[in-house]
Amino acid sequence: MSSLKGKVVHVDERYLHVELDDGRIISTPMQWYPDLQKASLRQLMKYHFICRGTGIEWPDLDYHLSIEAMFKDVRQAKAA
């Protein structure tokens, strides 16, 4: 699954959505990411992709998430 590359991140009150470069969209519950759930919308929109697009970083929050980890039931995981 290491070829999963993100294109766009969307957040709503319940889910973190990541659109992949192949057009698929992954959605996971925001409750899996308490640090992100507590963040403001402005903070959540300040993200960028890292590790050749396979991870997401929110620099203002010092939070990293691998896209592959979104497929696992790994709650509160900080992965890069």
Image (spheres, grey):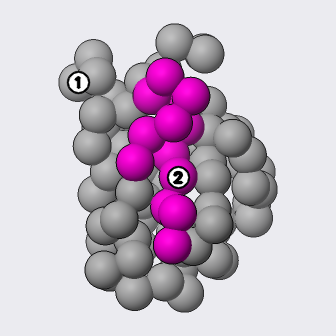
Q: Which mark lies nearer to you, 1 or 2?
A: 2
Kind of residue sitting beneath label 1: Gly
Instruction: State whether residue 61 is above or below residue 71.
Output: below
Instruction: State whether residue 56 is above or below residue 32.
Output: above
| Earlier sequence position, callout 1 versus callout 2 | 1
* In-front residue for pair 65/50: 50
Viewed as shown, does residue 74 lie left or right of 67? right
Residue farthest toward the left in the current orientation of the protein: 23
Q: Which mark is residue 57?
A: 2
**Quarter residue 11 falls in:** bottom left
Chain part drawn in magenta:
48-60
What residue is rendered at 49% in x and 22% in y?
A: 52
What residue is rendered at 76% in x and 56% in y?
A: 77
Q: Which residue is mark 1?
A: 23
What residue is rendered at 38% in x and 32% in y?
A: 6
Instruction: Let me know if residue 30 appears in the view.
Output: yes
Kind of residue sitting beneath label 2: Glu
What residue is rendered at 69% in x and 41% in y?
A: 80
Q: CA distance from mark 1 to mark 2?
A: 21 Å
> Residue 22: image x %, image y %?
27, 17
> Residue 46: image x %, image y %?
35, 65
* In-front residue for pair 57/33: 57
Q: Which mark is residue 14?
A: none
Magenta includes 58?
Answer: yes
Secondary structure of the residue carrying tag 1 is loop
> Residue 13: image x %, image y %?
36, 79
Magenta includes 59?
Answer: yes
Viewed as shown, does residue 61 lie left or right of 52? right
Q: Residues within 10 Å of mark 2 (few under 14, many from 20)?
A: many
Instruction: Let me know if residue 71 appears in the view.
Output: no
Q: Residues within 10 Å of mark 1 (few under 14, many from 20)?
A: few
